[in-house]
Image (spheres, rainbow, N blue to C red):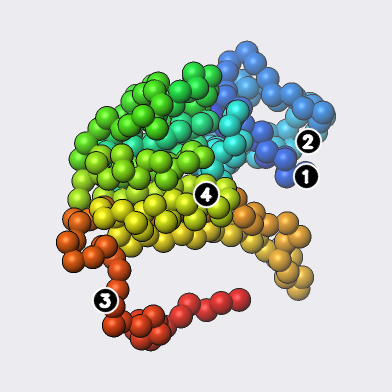
């Protein structure tokens, strides 16, 4: 078994109560212990054991010990601001096409959930620049990121109001998680390279409508779209197969658009005057709708 498979002091571990399903995120520290109403587990007894081991508390409760996935980590990590849920983080990652070597502008930093995803995707050759005026949020986010990624990551935090402008130029992506992203459409147009992507995450449809309309009206943006992602778990236990009673339904709306070259003949991304929506709809099959 490789040494990397063994749990080490100083790393974050997820403990899952095998009877209740409750999850606990801990940092393994020699001489300390995990405590719950079901007994305690000394951290020393976990250090050096393989990932996936079952640890037993002093009262006989069984906990599964694993390194958390990024989705598990962002749900359980300390936070002040509301995080973006994993289903939306995954959608942002794919639809905003975040990738290695990119420069990504982010606002705001919050608890660091989105920043963690961006940093993982851009890799060591990329760069994430986060605008955040709230010092306490920036400090908490930095702790969360360092606990997951270690001390070295390509993040620059600007303690300034992003509504006053974006300093960077020729960036690949602008990803916004703040109340009034429509106020930054012009600044994003200046900051983004041609072909770059704008992505805004907002909780309400009036906010989504305003940013969508601002992007659609701007000559440097095209292909604006707004949507949400719903996640419905299923309970599967032998012959009993049914949707779970609870689901992660609405959390926020994503609005995306591409940075393009302004077209003197009309707004980018608009159809010719004689093209009908019905004709366009026949070009591809509709997805299956439940």
Q: Secondary structure at mark 4?
A: helix
Quarter of the rendering occupied by the N terminus: top left
User: Residue at (27%, 62%) from the top-left corner?
Assistant: 267
Label 4 to label 1, Cα distance in Å?
42 Å
Label 4 to label 3, Cα distance in Å?
28 Å
For disc 1, the neighbor class at 10 Å (few under 14, some 14 to 19, many from 20) is few
- Residue 113 appears in view: yes
User: Residue at (18%, 55%) from the top-left corner?
Assistant: 261
Residue 190, horizontal then vertical, whole percent: 24, 41
The answer to whether the residue labelled 4 contacts the one labelled 2, judged by CB atoms less than 8 Å apart, is no
Q: Secondary structure at mark 2?
A: loop
Residue 152, horizontal then vertical, whole percent: 34, 24
Residue 144, horizontal then vertical, whole percent: 50, 27
**Residue under numbered circle 3:** 272
Label 3 to label 2, Cα distance in Å?
67 Å
Q: In terms of sequence position, does the residue under pointer 2 or pointer 1 come before the other?
A: 1
**Residue under numbered circle 1:** 19
The answer to whether the residue labelled 4 contacts the one labelled 1, judged by CB atoms less than 8 Å apart, is no
Q: In the image, 142: left or right of 270?
A: right
Q: In terms of sequence position, does the residue under pointer 3 or pointer 2 come before the other?
A: 2
Q: Secondary structure at mark 3?
A: loop
For disc 3, the neighbor class at 10 Å (few under 14, some 14 to 19, many from 20) is few
Q: In terms of sequence position, does the residue under pointer 4 or pointer 1 come before the other?
A: 1
Q: In terms of sequence position, does the residue under pointer 4 or pointer 3 come before the other?
A: 4
Up the image or down, 115 lies above or below 290; here it is above
User: Residue 207, labelled with which disc?
Assistant: 4
User: Residue 98, labelled with which disc?
Assistant: none
User: Residue at (39%, 49%) from the top-left corner?
Assistant: 199
Q: In the image, 29: left or right of 23?
A: left
Q: Nearer the viewer, mark 2 or mark 1?
A: 1
Q: In terms of sequence position, does the residue under pointer 4 or pointer 2 come before the other?
A: 2
**Residue under numbered circle 2:** 61
């Amino acid at each position: 078994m490789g040494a990397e498979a063994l749990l080490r002091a100083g790393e974050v571990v997820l403990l899952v109560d095998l009877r209740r399903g409750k999850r606990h995120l801990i940092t393994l520290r020699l001489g300390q212990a995990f405590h719950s109403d079901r007994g305690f587990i000394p951290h020393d007894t976990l250090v050096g054991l393989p990932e996936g081991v079952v640890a037993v508390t002093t009262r006989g409760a069984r906990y599964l010990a694993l390194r958390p996935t990024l989705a598990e980590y962002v749900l359980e990590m300390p936070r002040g601001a509301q995080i973006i849920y994993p289903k939306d983080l995954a959608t942002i990652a794919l639809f905003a096409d975040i990738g290695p070597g990119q420069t990504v502008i982010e606002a705001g930093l919050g608890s660091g959930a989105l920043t963690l995803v961006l940093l993982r995707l851009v890799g060591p050759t990329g760069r994430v620049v986060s605008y955040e005026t709230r010092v306490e949020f920036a400090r908490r986010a930095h702790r969360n990121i360092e606990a997951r990624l270690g001390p070295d990551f390509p993040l620059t935090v600007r303690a300034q109001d992003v509504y006053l402008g974006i300093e960077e130029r020729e960036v690949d992506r602008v990803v916004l998680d703040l109340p009034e992203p429509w106020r930054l459409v012009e600044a994003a147009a200046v900051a983004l390279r041609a072909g770059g992507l704008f992505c805004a995450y907002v909780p309400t449809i009036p906010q989504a409508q305003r940013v969508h309309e601002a992007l659609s009206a701007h000559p440097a943006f095209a292909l604006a779209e707004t949507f949400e992602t719903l996640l419905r778990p299923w309970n599967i236990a032998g012959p009993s197969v049914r949707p779970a009673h609870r689901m992660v339904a609405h959390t926020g709306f994503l609005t995306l658009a591409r940075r393009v070259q302004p077209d003197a003949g009309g707004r980018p991304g608009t159809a010719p005057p004689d093209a009908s929506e019905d004709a366009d709809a026949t070009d591809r099959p509709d997805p299956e709708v439940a």
